[in-house]
Structure formats: C-alpha cells, structure tokens
Image (cartoon, helix red, strand yellow):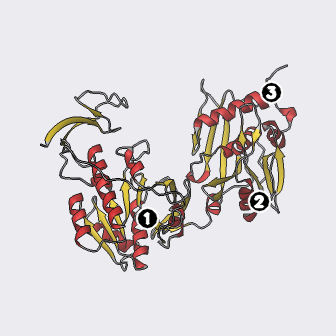
Amino acid sequence: MARNATRYVCQQCGASHPKWSGRCEACGAWNTLVEEVVQSSRGLKGDKGHAISFDDLQARGEDPKRTESGIAEFDRVCGGGLVEGSVLLVGGDPGIGKSTLLLQVVAALARRGHRCAYISGEEASAQVRLRGQRLGLADAPIALAAATSVRDIAATMASEKPPAVLIIDSIQTMYLDTLESAPGTVAQVRASALELIQLAKRRGVILVLVGHVTKDGQLAGPRVLEHMVDTVLYFEGERSHHFRILRAVKNRFGPTDEIGVFEMTDRGLMEVANPSSLFLGSRDRSISGAAVFAGVEGTRPLLIEIQALVAPSSLATPRRTAVGWDSGRLSMILAVLDARCGLAFAGRDVYLNVAGGLRVQEPAVDLAVAAALTSSMANQPVPADSIVFGEIGLSGEVRMVSLAELRLKEAAKLGFSRAIVPKGLRTPSPGVTVTEISRLSDLVDLIEPGERRAPARGWK
C-alpha cells in the first residue's frame, strides 16, 4: 500500500537528507534544505521484467531525420539541424535573448511548413504575441499557450496531433501535481523534465527546454537535468555588447564546443556570417599592447584581438585583472615571462581584455597574451598584419596546437600576411609568411631587443 514519506532535499545539489539541518552535508551550502513529501510504494511480489534484445554495431537502421530551421548559425550549433525526438536544453543569463532566439527559430520552422508550439510559463500569450509582432514574425503560424501544469501539457499533446517542435519556456516554472513541493525545486524540475522528455521520445517531438542559470552561470536545478537531455546549449554575451554567442557544451548528434554568433538588433537576433570581422572591426592597428589571436571554436576559426595594459602601480599588491580569460593562467604567463625572459612585472598593474566580450578557453591563446603583454611593457606595437597562436609551458617552451592550418587559412582570408607560430607546422598556408619559434624568449626578442631587458633568472 502506498504511503507518504518526508525528506529534505538540497536545492543546490539535489542531495536528500532524512532530517533538516542548516548545512547540506553533500555540497556544504547553507539554508538550502527544503522539506518535500514523496509518495513511495512497495513493488508487487512476483513482478518480473521483460527480456532485453541486443544489437551489434553493424546493425542497419534509419539515420535520425534532421529538420533545418533555416537559421544557419543555430543549425550549425545543433550539428546540422534538429533531430526528430531529441531534447535540447537552452540556458543563459536573464534578458540575454533566449526567448527571442527560440521564437525566431520556431517562426522559421513554422514558415517551412512544420507544426510548432510555444508554451510559456512566465508570460501570457499576449506578451509573446507582442514580441513576435515587434520581431516581424506575426505571419508565422505558431501555436501559443501559457501553461505550467505538465499534466495539462501531456493531455494536450496526447489528445491531438502533436507538433513537430515544442518549446517550453521555462522548465523551472513547470510542476507536477503529484509532488507537494513548489515549482522550481529540485524535485519538481527533475520530475517535470523526465515526464516531458518521455513524452517527446514517445511521440517523436523535438522538445526545447529553456533553463534558468544561477549567479555562477550554471544551469539551475539538479545536475542530472543536463544528463537527461540530448543537447545542452548556452547563450552567452555581455549586455554592453551587441553580439551573442550560442555555444554547444553537449550534443549527442553533433560536435561539442561549436558556436553560433548573432548580433542583437531592434529586429531581433541577426546571424553573423563572418565573426572575425565583427571582433576586429574597431581595432586600432598602431597602438601597443594588442595582438591578434587565431583561435578555433568547435570547427569555426575566429580571429580575436587580445589587449593588454601594463602600468605602474601605487599599491603594495599590484592588480592582476583578466576579462574574458582565466586569471590563474594570466598569473602563470606573467611568471614565465619574468623567470624565463627577464621581464619584471613587480610593481606594475596588469590588465588583460579579450576584445568584444568573447570568453576564450583554449590554451592556444597563451602566445598571443604574452605578445600583448610584452608589447605593452616595451611600448612597441605588434605588426598589424600579424597573427599569433601557441601554447606556453612553464619552462618557457612554445608548443604546437591543433588545427594550425585552419587558423592560417582564416588569417589569409582576412588579409593577414604574417604569423608567429610554434615550430612543427606541417603545411604553411600560401600567402602567409610564418615565423616559427620554440622558446618564449624568441617572441620577446621579436618585439623588444634583448639588451633592454634584465637577464633571465636560471642556473649559472
């Protein structure tokens, strides 16, 4: 016979506790335990499962069908289009443009003849309609609804022909009436997502869930939510900049770390076909402390300007500030420049900025950061037609990075004629003069003559 049980669930990590306490023993968060009543039942004696049938890797079957939205940047991030029966989770900061992007996607799909539904748990249908009119999407045949009950959504999908694409905005507002906890709690988010995912898999519906993020930038709710879905997309960008980045951090049907670039306008989000020109559009070619980095995001090459400023400090502990890059790795590059190349940054403030607000994570940017720092220190500009990339080790060596030829092709396409790269390049790109270096001191010598520097510290 079913009976009710009470437990206390941490809203930060989802850990369950038999009694309340001020601090979660699993993640260490304070005042995050919330009482939840769950229904448990004993299984019937004698119940047996069904035998599972197995296939091998050579089994032939139909490839998953992809549906292209017509928005090339969105389709690129999804791996070439939306897969039938797949579930996508889209996260991002409040006001970054998640609802705007998804409304444009379903409008493009609806205009191509696909049945699309947009269910909002945060806005009324009239509000969504006004946004669509402002974006010029009023003629798109989209079914709009405002609902928060998962039971009602499941009944609607089962009572009529389901739509090909279903948007749920957002999963934190959905609830199941079988649970007594409030919407947005770990139990409600987990159970609501599971019910909707199972519904989408059974009916072959493309389900897109919008997820809120915490102040740390992580998706709110249980971590298992990201494991349950097929694709996780993050919508990134700075409010002070007009462009947005859609990044795939998980994709069962395509490459990860792929990005799509959009520009925010008064008519909504517009695709940016050539992101490198956007990031380098307002670049000053004659000032010191700047270097152009040839990076790769997923399968897309990007040219990004790295800016550095080294200034005398009046503080006992000089500032070390990095925007768009890991501050810990900045400290490492400064230490290597000091110990291996004789550049003393003691008593100086160091500021590093990735122009345009983009966040760079790959280690290939190390050499461009070192070039910008050295240029600012020596007040000598890096040649305007040069690009730089390479990874730096603690001993001062410069290591080759992947996809070097792709980076050089992008540089040649945008008019750059010189490149400073690590040794070991296999096939140089035509039209680009390559300077190969093996030590960080070689880069410093290219920018600042060795006689002006203090001798590097090392073994006698």
Q: Residue at x 47, y 67 (%)?
A: 64
Q: Position of residue 223 (x, y in %)?
A: 39, 44
Q: Position of residue 102 (x, y in %)?
A: 41, 65
Query: How many angstroms separate mark 1 from mark 2 (CA)?
Result: 34 Å
N-terminal-most mark, 3 or 1: 1
User: Which residue is labeled 2 in the image?
Assistant: 416
Q: Position of residue 394 (x, y in %)?
A: 71, 31
Q: Position of residue 170 (x, y in %)?
A: 32, 56
**Image disc number at residue 123:** none
Mark 1 vs mark 2: give the one in front. Answer: 1
Closer-to-camera residue (205/245): 205
Mark 3 vs mark 1: give the one in front. Answer: 1
Instruction: State the residue lying farthest toward the top.
Output: 460
| Amino acid found under the numbered disc labelled 3 | Ala
| Position of 243 relative to 324 (above/below) | below
| Amino acid found under the numbered disc labelled 1 | Leu
User: Which residue is labeled 3 in the image?
Assistant: 456
Query: How many angstroms separate mark 3 from mark 2 (CA)?
Result: 32 Å
Give the quadrant of residue 332: top right
N-terminal-most mark, 1 or 2: 1
Q: Quadrant of the C terminus?
A: top right
Give the quadrant of residue 39: top left
**Does dot 1 land on a helix, a strand or a loop?**
helix
Query: How many angstroms separate mark 3 from mark 1 (CA)?
Result: 52 Å
Query: Would you call the spot at circle 3 few (<14 residues within 10 Å), some (14-19), or many (20 or more)?
Result: some
Total labels drawn: 3
User: Which residue is labeled 1 in the image?
Assistant: 101
